[in-house]
Amino acid sequence: MLDIGPLFLIALDGKTLTPEEKEAISLFGLRHFIFFSRNLGSYGETRALLEELETLAGKGLRAIDQEGGPVSRLKPPHFPGLKAPLSLASEEDPEEAVAREAVLCARELKRWGFNFNLAPVLDLGEETAPSFLKGRTFGGDPQMVAGLARVYIRAFLAEGLLCCAKHFPGLGGVEVDPHQGLPVKETVEEEDLLPFLEAIRIGVPAVMTTHLLIPAWDKEPATFSSKIVKFLRENLGFKGLILTDDLFMGGALARASLEEAVLRAFLAGHDLLLLCGEFHKSIDALAIFSEECQKSLILRKKVGEKLSFIEKQLHPSINLTNWRF
């Protein structure tokens, strides 16, 4: 069996590991996991799950969406209540407010045992943004969003945690929720890219693409677009990890089955493939991907290159000083 597990950031079904999950961790060499409310209990319960994962899977990414406000997987009373990014941006001193919340979030996540926060959201969106973005952004002014992103990312890196700029190349202005369907944006403007450029400039470790079709750029949505991944690498100079948004989302499945989405997102050049749905469906997709790799020397070579790249990116000596994965 080809060791494809480290290509995936995968969700589990509950607060404890099932026999199926334990078997798949061993079979595929799974190392990286994302956690949702369904996986999170008390501090003690969550630590026990994380420790069992480390025993079975070794060290790896332990990711969570702890943006603050509407998207906070850990909630009071177990975790401090974090303000929504848009609320922080409206405070008298937004930079101080963002720095305060980012440091609090990072320190608490580290205490719990997480090392990768899928934040900040760098899409442009005001109070009138559609529900799937409302409150999650730093606002509609690209200069302000870029400045607050800089504060947030620096706080996380100073605390020794990974963070992620999302959702590239920007969902600002779209109405269709990519969780439900595939949004279309005729083109991307310089102002959409400005926050991502600033995040890249200061060393954000990861960028998440989004399920978004941009006809002026490519006939394929960003998730499946080698052109857009190449643009992020070559035109914007990003050298860190590129991950997909959840491949179970409607925006991805509008153009492919889950199994096809995994293969197409990988071939587009993504480093990590995010699977947040039911575990058995994720494993079925991994099994098919593994079979395809076994049949193709080119695929096996690409897998080997990606695994080497991911390992180098996650080495503690790479732009993080006090972080252990």
Image (tube, grey):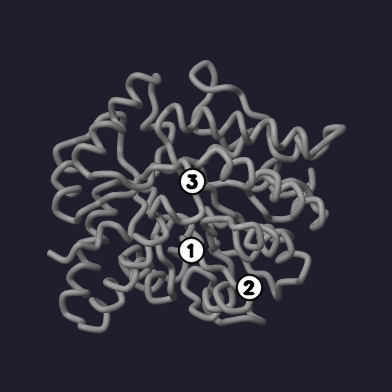
Which residue extends farthest top? Answer: 77
| Label 1 element class | strand
Look at 49% across and 28% down and name the residue there: 74
Camera-nearest residue between 145 and 212: 145
Q: Position of residue 82 (x, y in %)?
A: 63, 28
Q: Tell me, yes or no, whether the two marked residues, 1 and 2, touch with CB atoms within 8 Å.
A: no
The residue under label 1 is 242
Q: CA distance from mark 3 to mark 1?
A: 21 Å
Where is residue 68, by image quadrant? top right
Task: Give the residue at x 40% y 55%.
Answer: 314
The residue type indicated by label 1 comes to Ile
The percent position of residue 110, horizontal first and vertical second, equals 46, 32
Q: Quadrant of residue 111?
A: top left
Quote the CA–CA distance across marks 1 and 2. 13 Å
What's the residue type where badge 2 is placed?
Answer: Leu
The residue pinned by badge 2 equals 236
State the quadrant of the C terminus: top left
Classify 35 as above or below 48. Answer: below
Q: Position of residue 61 (x, y in %)?
A: 38, 47
